[in-house]
Image (cartoon, rainbow, N blue to C red):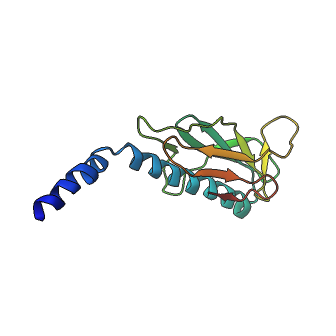
Amino acid sequence: MVLVLLGILAVYAVPRMINTGDFYARGFHDQSLAYLRYAQKTAIAQRRTVCVTLSSNGISLSMASAAASNTCAATLPGPNGEAALSARSGVAFSSTLSNFNFDALGQPVTTAATPAQAATQVLQVANVSRSITIETGTGYVHE
């Protein structure tokens, strides 16, 4: 009986433990979700524009130096104090990304010269079934 259980574990559990790519992808998804929530909450708390710059494998944040300004000049450290969030090799966003800002009310706006409300953003990390959605009107960040 013990040998049968060990055989089942060897077939199903060991390959999942060895393939860590899925774990890293899920971790990057969770960190990205936290980063975006942090950006929105910082914009509301500081009453300043927070710029979100997205790349295929990372997120960086910056903040306007003055409350009335829409130009982000100061780097905003993330929730853990790091300058930017970067994925491990082999982990990346799989959706089309566009940079956007959170205004002082926490609403997403485009980075164009004429501020306009941004379309609903959906971010998808490769190998993760859930996606991150940033709502148009409210800026609510959720899975």
Residue 13 visible, this angle: yes
User: Where the N terminus falls, by quadrant?
Assistant: bottom left
Q: Residue at x 53, y 57 (%)?
A: 79
Kindly indicate the quadrant of the structure image that contains residue 53: top right
Q: Within the image, what quadrant is residue 119 found in?
A: top right
Give x and y (percent) for residue 90.
42, 35
- Left or right side of 77 for 89: left
How many marks the image carries: the answer is: 0
Compared across the picture, whether 30 is left or right of 69 comes to left
Q: Could you tell me residue 15's position as x and y percent? A: 27, 46
In front here: 102 or 132?
A: 132
- Seen in the image, is 91 located left or right of residue 98? left
Q: Residue at x 58, y 54 (%)?
A: 33
Picture residue at 51% right of the left edge, 37% below the top: 92
Q: Position of residue 58 (x, y in %)?
A: 54, 40
Q: Is residue 61 visible?
A: no
Quadrant showing the C terminus: bottom right
Q: Position of residue 46 (x, y in %)?
A: 71, 60
The part of the image, by quadrant, that contains residue 114 is top right
Residue depicted at 71% across the width and 45% down the height: 121
Residue nearest the observer in this picture, 77 or 99: 99
In the figure, is residue 61 to the left or right of 79? right
Residue 43, placed above or below residue 115 = below
